[in-house]
Structures are given as C-alpha cells and as structure tokens.
Amino acid sequence: MNPTVSIIIPVYNAESTLDRCLESILTQSLREIEVLCINDGSTDGTGEILKRWEKQDGRVRVRQLEENMGLLPAENVGIRASRGEYVMFVDADDRLLPGACENAVRLIREYDVDILQFGVKVNVAPGKDEACWKKLFASRDFTSEGINILYDCYSMHRFPNRIWNKIYRGEVCRAASASMPDLQISLLADVLQAFFFFYYARTFQSVTDGPYYEYYVGNGISTSDLSPKRFVDLCAASAILPAIEEFLHQENALENNHFLVEGIKMHMKSGVIDTLLSLPEITKETIDLVMKSWGSEVLYDFIEVTGLLNVKCKSRRNLVPALMNQLQKQQSQLSPSVREVTLTTGGHNAAQPVPGVRPAQNEEKK
C-alpha cells in the first residue's frame, strides 16, 4: 500500500541538525508516510546518521549520491522515487511541527486543490532582520488557478516561491520533475522547482492554518552570510532563466508569457544585486564572474541601485570605475535595451531609476 505522504529531505553535511529534523517527522500523528532522504555526497557524519534512522524506522528510505550534485538534482531523485498520494519537502536544518502532515492532508483534501500553502513559524537568529522574514512568510487566504498561479508568485508577488511551506498532489510533482532539467544548482533552486510545480498545477490554495513548518534563519547548516562558494553557487543559478525559456518555447508558450519571464528575471536579478550589496568588498574576480554568469545588464543595474542608495563606503567608490572599465569592453555586446548610465566625479548619477529593481529580501536560506 502506497503512503499518504512522501516527505523529501535533501541532505548535505547536516550532522548537527539532521536528528532534530527526522525526529520531528517520524513522530508525526499521521503514520502513513515515507521519508526519502537524499544524501547529496555529504563528507561529515550525515551518512551514519541516515543509516541509523533507516535501520530504526522502516519508513525511512535513503538514496546516496556519490558526489555533491546540488539541491535541485537531489530533490528530483526524491520526487522520482516517491510513491505518496501527496508530497512535502523539508530542509535538513528545519523541522515539521506536531500535526503538520495530518492537518496538511486534511486541508488539501478539503479544498480539493493541487497545491496547498500553509503557515510557517520563522525562527530567526540574532542579528537577522526578523520583521522582514516574518513578513515574507505571513499567512494569508487566497485561491489561484491555471497560469495565474505562476503570475501570482513571480509577477504579483502574492506568495513566496519556497517549496517547503506547501503540500502537493504527488502526480503534479512527478509530472513536473519529469520535465525539469537536473541543473547542478543549490541557490535559487526554488525558483526553478516552483515554476515547474506551478506550471503543472491547476489549482492553488493558500491558508492561514498553522504554523506547520519551522524555518530556521541563520541557525542552520546554511546561512545568508556570503562565502566564496556561496557566491559561485549564486552565479551558477544564472542557468535557471534560459531553462525556463527553453521549456516555454517547447510548450509553444514563450511568446504569450513574456511578462511572466520578465517577472522571473527581475526576481532573480534583484537577488543578485542584493547579494552584491552585502559584499564587504568587490574584486575584479567578482566582477568577471557576475559578467560571465549574469551579463552586463545586472552590473549596470547594480551601479544604479548603488547610486540610488547613496552608498558611500570606499569599496563602492572604487567599484564604479572598475565596473565601467569592464563594461566598456563589453559595450558592443550589449543589447539596445540596456540603458545609458552616466557617472559624475563624486559618484553615480543615474538618468532614471531602475524599474522594479530594489534591494531584495534574501532569496536563499539563511
């Protein structure tokens, strides 16, 4: 007999939080679950912890990846192995709250929808912007259908594109995963995953019930503090938009959804710009990496946002001529849509603000 819910946990070097996560799931009141743990090439004690839980509880199924493939391929392995009527996702440094599975199943059946979004408890570490995170995941009641699900998320920003504060019909997740490319990305993976889930869903319901999920910001195995590897991962995520455009092209839906694609592009660009703003110093190597991954237009927008924010620190002042030297080398490659940027000796003086670009909330955990 197939389980009611398949719970998918991508795991990478999570030895410090994994026991807490699994205990919260395996003590759920709904017993008819399977827990698919995808060990994404961990190099710490994660593998031994998973073996212990798999031996202890037959509902735990472990899949081992020989090398670190990234969040997206790991979760796709879990989706494709799932058997549940419904699917949920949990990060290895978060946990489900008591009664989460039972209540989520009850609600998705009650509303008879493909995707149901529920309330989240945000656990914010000291020094993080607690109000910002809690606002992002504030519960609200609304319904969406068809292509409007995508527009409500990426263009209207009615709800975040996180995949773990939702429960899905299993058939929707499995159909979406079959079409989803296995890009080796971790940061911003939710952008691509949610796009495919929402594309294949017919109905979506957000409710204020809960919270059913506890999200740890700044306490877990990943953090929003920037590291060199994290920045490289962010640049690797530039492959997401071309993958979405290619899929829509194959579906003969690209031309009719230009506004949607622009919304996703703006969403991702704002995340890159926000990350650049958080860097203590920007080197030539940083500029080259952003140029290669995201193109010159993002750097132009970054200069404009920097000027609009009146950022005065030394590293930002030194950044402007360095950026402009790099951009001038690329001038012939810029599309006509890229706006002119004027500079003054004392800093940046943009002709116009960048439409829709603002300092973004951190899109990736934590």
Image: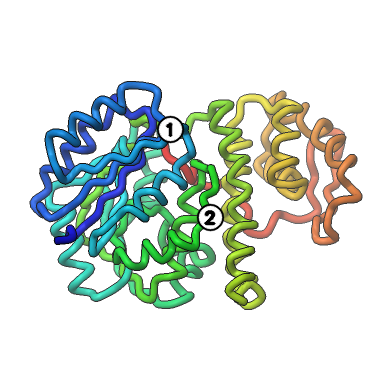
Residue 216 vertical position relative to residue 252 in the rendered view, above or below: above
Q: Quadrant of the N terminus?
A: bottom left
Kindly identify which residue carries mark 1: 66
Determine which quarter of the picture holds residue 248: bottom right
How would you rate the neighbour count of disc 2 (Cα within 10 Å): few for under 14, some for 14-19, many for 20 or more? some
State left or right for residue 189 relative to residue 168. Answer: right
State left or right for residue 20 relative to residue 324. Answer: left
Q: Quadrant of the C terminus?
A: top left
Return the residue nearer the eye: 137 or 240. Answer: 240
Q: Secondary structure at mark 2?
A: loop
Residue 230 vertical position relative to residue 105 in the rendered view, above or below: above
| Residue ID at (64%, 57%) | 242
Mark nearest the camera among 1 and 2 is 1
Any mark on residue 181, and which?
Answer: 2
Please name the amino acid that badge 1 sits on: Glu
Give the x, y percent position of residue 174: 37, 62
| Residue ID at (30%, 28%) | 47
Q: Secondary structure at mark 1?
A: loop
| Residue ID at (83%, 48%) | 341
Return the residue nearer the eye: 25 or 63. Answer: 63
Determine which quarter of the picture holds residue 74: top left
Please name the amino acid that badge 2 sits on: Pro
